[in-house]
Image: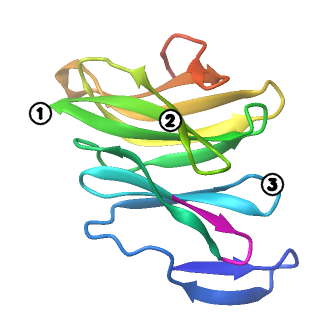
Amino acid sequence: SLWRVSTNNVLVSSDLRLISAAGLKSVDIASDGSGAGLLVWSTDTEVRAQRISLDGTLLGNAISISNGNDKPAAAVTYDGTLEQYVVAWQRVVSPGNSDIYAATVTTGGVVASTFQVSDAPTEEGQTDIAYSALNGQTLVVWSSKEAGGRPAIKARRLSSGAPVSPVFVVS
């Protein structure tokens, strides 16, 4: 469900049913700053998106971002420099080995590119993503299970819809 709140924090409408997906695992939303947004959700096997207006109206059809061995915790941000959304998620390669992928999606709802963010031979997941207008870059972060089961948080910077830094350890 989605609740729409005015700029002065007054509930305008509630319980807008936008999607119905079996096995729903995560939901995230990003605004393009001009009254539209991209709602992203993941199930056990796919990542999908739906453009949405400020009043909750669905714009166009649902978009398949990725399907196959994709897992929960897809995340989305709006890249103001690129003027596209960037979606990040976990893809299972084999048991105990998963990678992080990302895709750019136009404001018209077209998947413009898909690329690998990290391919370490470990279990990676729990993605999140944010855009910085200060440097025009996007930061993807995720958890990683290192050798011996030691947890780590890793990240990689993106610019213009492509990685621009090596993967680095945050914690």
Is disc 2 surrounded by few (<14), some (14 to 19) or many (20+) residues within 10 Å?
many
Residue depicted at x 29% and y 36%? 91
Residue depicted at x 41% and y 40%? 89
Q: For the residues marked 1 and 2, what is the alpha-carbon distance in whole angstroms?
A: 23 Å
Q: Is residue 44 above or below residue 35?
A: above
Tag in front: 1 or 2:
2
Of residues 162 and 167, the one nearer the viewer is: 162
Q: Position of residue 60 (x, y in %)?
A: 57, 64
Which residue is identified by label 3?
33
Is disc 1 surrounded by few (<14), some (14 to 19) or many (20+) residues within 10 Å?
few
Amino acid type for the residue under numbered disc 1: Pro
Amino acid type for the residue under numbered disc 2: Ala
SS at badge 2: strand
Amino acid type for the residue under numbered disc 3: Gly
Of residues 81 and 123, the one nearer the viewer is: 81
Q: Earlier in the sequence, mark 1 or mark 3?
A: 3
Is residue 31 visible in the rendered structure shown here?
A: yes
Which residue is identified by label 1?
95
Q: Is residue 45 above or below residue 8?
A: above
State left or right for residue 77 relative to residue 75: right
Q: Position of residue 6 (x, y in %)?
A: 82, 79
Q: How many marks?
A: 3
Is label 1 in contact with label 2 (beta carbons under 8 Å)?
no
Is label 1 in contact with label 3 (beta carbons under 8 Å)?
no
Which label belongs to residue 103? 2
The magenta region covers 50-56
Q: Earlier in the sequence, mark 3 or mark 2?
A: 3
Q: For the residues marked 1 and 3, what is the alpha-carbon distance in whole angstroms?
A: 40 Å
Q: For the residues marked 3 and 2, what is the alpha-carbon distance in whole angstroms?
A: 20 Å
